[in-house]
Image: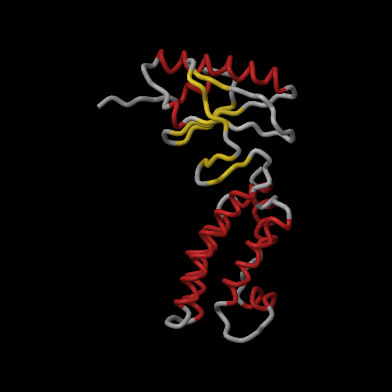
Amino acid sequence: MDTLYINDIVKASNFNTVLYANDINLHISGKNHEILEKTVNHEFKKIDHWVRANKLSINYSKSNFMLMNNHKNINFSVSINHHPISKQSSLKYLSVILDDKLNWKPQIEKLVTQLSISCGMMFKLKHYINISVLKSVYFALFHSYLTYSMLNWGRANKTTLLTLIRLQNKSVRTREYNKTKTTILYSKHKILEIPDLFQLSVSKFMYSF
């Protein structure tokens, strides 16, 4: 069996290229959208040439692009080998939803849906397991989803994060049957709140440098 290496595609164009498994993320920036449009289409010609030279093919139906900007109704078209590429307002990459305004609303909405299910499971389980086991369930089913890519979406404004914060409060309250203040519960069970988790993520990232 022959092994195919495509790592050298990063040298095929001036795109900033991120490879993961069989997914390729290409991104580039510019101050003028008209010049940027020409640049993008020119760089895609290089990508298309590389693909053909290596006897590969692009799935055009699964290829999309997103224009991140603060303006509305900008006419911006992209094509590869005369195949138009669909423009999207949000895209999923490595299970994280990026939106063209970087307000992270689609990603947080997805998180709320996922964590609501986890929260419901915890409420059902609390009648059958002790607090120690329930805490382990929290970290397995809630915390793991909550902290994934938090370094990115954690930058969202407080209004956008409010539903998620309330959901975390609800999940922490599953451990107690009384009306103890949520802040006390966080301290008691040694669980960080969302703002504190975000600051921890930032600190770890900065420390790595």
Q: Residue at x 61, y 67 (%)?
A: 168
Residue 36: give x, y in percent of width and height: 67, 20
Task: Depth check: give the residue in front, 100 or 130.
Answer: 100
Name above or below for residue 205 compared with residue 35. below
Residue 44: give x, y in percent of width and height: 54, 18
Q: Residue at x 53, y 59 (%)?
A: 113
Which residue is most to the left?
1
> How is colour applied across the structure in the image?
secondary structure
Q: Residue at x 45, y 83 (%)?
A: 127
Task: Depth check: give the residue in front, 82 or 58.
Answer: 82
Q: Residue at x 52, y 31 (%)?
A: 64
Question: Quarter of the image holding residue 195?
Answer: bottom right
Name above or below for residue 8 compared with residue 166. above
Task: Depth check: give the residue in front, 51 or 98.
Answer: 98
Residue 78: give x, y in percent of width and height: 57, 22
Task: Depth check: give the residue in front, 205 or 111.
Answer: 111
Residue 4: give x, y in percent of width and height: 35, 25
Could you tell me which quadrant the N terminus lies in? Answer: top left
Could you tell me which quadrant the C terminus lies in? Answer: top right
Number of dots carrying numbers: 0
